[in-house]
Image (spheres, rainbow, N blue to C red):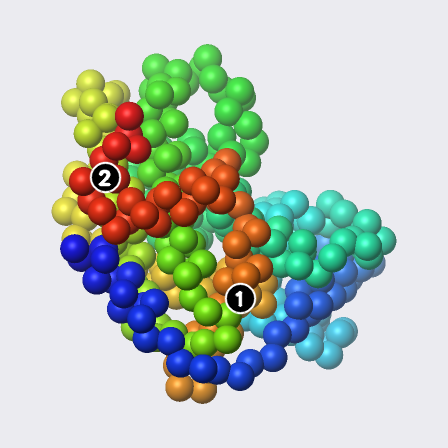
Amino acid sequence: MNAIKAMLEVTEHGRPAAVQWQAQRPKTAVLDALAFAREHDGLAASQPWALASRTARELEDAFGYAPHGGWIRFIGLATGAGWFTAQPDRFVARAWPHELIEVPPEVVQKRLVESFTQMLCPPQAMAGMLVTLDLHPMWGLRVAHDVQVGAADGEIRDESIFPRQTRDAVARMIFGTIASFVSVLWKLDPTNSYPMDPMANLFYECASVARNAVKDTIDAPSRPLPVFMGTDISQGRALTDFLHADIFDALLVPANLAQYTPDGRVVVRSDVLRTVGVGQLGSEEIEHWGEWLSSVPAVMSIAC
């Protein structure tokens, strides 16, 4: 019932909102950042996956604007989307601006969001999810490696530590959490604004349901590396305020698929968000996660 209540607290309180969407802005930002990186031998980073603040200022000075959410967050998403490579001290352009000229703006938005929903980037957002799920960091890193590099690499070398069946279950839990949350956002009317306050609790319930769905399928005592840290998952609730906000601030807002209203509510381009992939799940599977979110007994069947 907690999951149902969390969903209703979000979806049942929409208000008409007049917002202007700038679908072209993310594409323009990618093109400009690539051109700048090609001209300046990359974009300087303050640490891995973190654009240096001075570089963000240089980009803003060069082009006279910043993408929604700022250049630092935007470049992290563009890197997860495959247009840049993150090195310890810089972001190196992987694509050329002319390669994106004919790409529709909505496709650019979609790929930016899939930086997280499919590739689990940037790592800062991924780290918050691991804590909320009580997942051992090494398991999270292994799953992220699988989706970013490929599961075949290291398959034989670490099979005894990271068995394939368990890796699949952990991946199902991570992407199930994302799918559950996204499935609720799909229900939002893109012409209405919705309260932000219940979003943290909603994300916590999505994580709880996904975790319970796979926990009983993992024989934890026999694992050389535990899957879960053993912490009371309720302690992760305190972090969901940051994590759910990160999903909006560092993901949907830079992709221009979410906007905040002056009264602190949020509007979501749910129509475009429906085209976004989550892991290897199809749209029907994502909707099923939303249905399972409303029925805890039913959600247990996904582990089979």
Query: Element under label 1?
Result: loop
Q: Note whether residue 171 is visible.
A: yes
In this view, the residue in front, 43 or 30, is 30
Question: Residue 291 in the image: x percent, y percent?
Answer: 32, 48
Q: Which residue is mark 1?
A: 269
Please rate how many residues cluster around mark 2, counting C-alpha atoms within 10 Å: few if below 14, some from 14 to 19, many from 20. few
| Amino acid type, residue under disc 1 in the picture | Arg
Disc 2/disc 1 C-alpha distance (Å): 29 Å
Horizontal placement of 179 versus 269: left or right?
A: left
In this view, the residue in front, 274 or 32, is 274
Q: Is 203 above or below relative to 118?
A: below
Q: Is 226 above or below relative to 46?
A: above
The image quadrant that residue 212 belongs to is top left
- Tell how many labels: 2
Please rate how many residues cluster around mark 1, counting C-alpha atoms within 10 Å: few if below 14, some from 14 to 19, many from 20. many
Horizontal placement of 222 versus 74: left or right?
A: left
| Amino acid type, residue under disc 2 in the picture | Ala
**Residue displayed at 54% across by 61% down:** 271
Could you tell which of marks 2 and 1 lies nearer the N-terminus?
1
In this view, the residue in front, 44 or 244, is 244
